[in-house]
Image (cartoon, coloured by chain):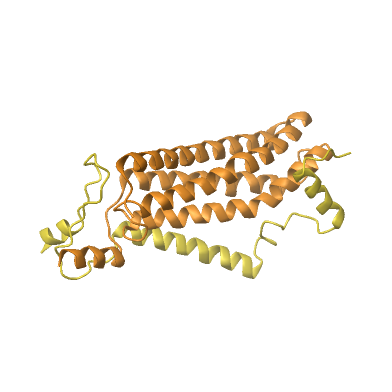
């Protein structure tokens, strides 16, 4: 399935928009998480966790699925393929991992938002959970998304065995 | 031989056309490139590390629900928050 150049450009635009938007939204989520950790203003702390849940459900989850979907369509409908080049395969696996970890994190994020909406949080309340949302998950997610963008830009060489066999069979 | 191998891996990522351009002149599959092996080993190492942490319990209970109380009341709080209900 090969798309016309015009349609391909449109899907590529969608994919870049979703992916760049996702990394920006994760950066915003990280900033809110840090503010929730270090702020001494109880109103700010409560507001950050409510906003983090809003960002998660209205931006992060939709954009992560859209990025995955447009990426798969883009690769399947172009000569790059989905399993022919290592960089495409690596992007796919990393994006799937990001989506799974994000979905696993929605429960604690919603829990934090519910607690913040109900009560006033002190700096030590649910400290482990608040720290966990920021450092390993949002920070790690940002690094992985940056790695995915690097793969897209550099397109490092290397055919998979499937891709090599496919190209070799076509030439012979 | 070295030149042939180099050609077999060449990809023109900066040709402006965004099209794959890898040659397969070599008769046998040259194997995965070094960067893919390093990335794979790194990802595998992280999976093994987290598996060990999870299975041995080092660092306390882990997982997305580890901080969440299991009572129904708190579950109701979470559900209410997701539905946008006003909490007392």
Q: Is residue B11 visible?
A: yes
Q: Which chain is yellow?
A: B
Residue B12 in the image, given as x and y percentages of width and height: 21, 47
Residue B19 in the image, given as x and y percentages of width and height: 25, 47
**Quadrant containing the C terminus of chain B in the rendered view:** top right
**Quadrant containing the N terminus of chain B in the rendered view:** bottom left
Front-most of A107 and A10? A10
Q: Residue at x 62, y 66 (%)?
A: B54
Rendering quarter of residue A25: top right
Q: Residue at x 73, y 32 (%)?
A: A47
Counting labels gives 0
Relative to A56, say whether A72 is above or below: below
Q: Residue at x 65, y 43 (%)?
A: A57
Left or right: A86 as drawn, with respect to B19:
right
Left or right: A119 as drawn, with respect to B82:
right
Q: Is residue A121 visible?
A: no
Relative to A96, say whether A115 is above or below: above
Q: Which chain is orange?
A: A
Relative to B2, say whether B12 is above or below: above
Residue B31 in the image, given as x and y percentages of width and height: 26, 66
Front-most of A82 and B44? A82
């Amino acid at each position: 399935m090969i798309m016309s150049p015009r349609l391909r450009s449109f899907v590529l635009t969608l994919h870049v928009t979703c992916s760049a938007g996702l990394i920006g939204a994760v950066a915003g989520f990280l900033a809110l998480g840090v503010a929730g950790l270090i702020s001494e203003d109880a109103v700010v702390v409560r507001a950050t966790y409510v906003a983090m849940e809003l960002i998660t459900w209205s931006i992060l989850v939709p954009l992560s699925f859209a990025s995955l979907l447009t990426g798969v369509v883009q690769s399947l409908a172009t000569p790059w393929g989905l399993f022919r080049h290592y960089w495409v395969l690596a992007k796919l696996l990393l994006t799937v991992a990001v989506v799974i970890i994000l979905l696993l994190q929605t429960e604690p994020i919603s829990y934090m938002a519910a607690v913040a909406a109900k009560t006033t949080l002190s700096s030590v309340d649910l400290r482990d959970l608040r720290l966990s949302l920021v450092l390993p998950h949002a920070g790690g997610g940002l690094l992985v998304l940056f790695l995915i963008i690097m793969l897209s830009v550099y397109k490092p060489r290397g055919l998979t065995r499937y891709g090599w066999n496919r190209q070799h069979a076509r030439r012979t | 031989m070295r030149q042939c191998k180099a050609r077999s891996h060449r990809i023109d990522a900066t040709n402006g056309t965004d099209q794959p351009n890898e040659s397969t002149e070599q008769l046998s599959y040259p194997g995965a490139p070094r960067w893919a092996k390093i990335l794979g080993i790194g990802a595998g190492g992280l999976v093994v590390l987290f598996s060990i942490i999870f299975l041995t319990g080092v660092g306390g209970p882990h997982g997305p629900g580890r901080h969440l109380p299991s009572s129904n009341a708190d579950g109701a709080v979470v559900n209410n928050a997701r539905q946008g209900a006003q909490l007392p």
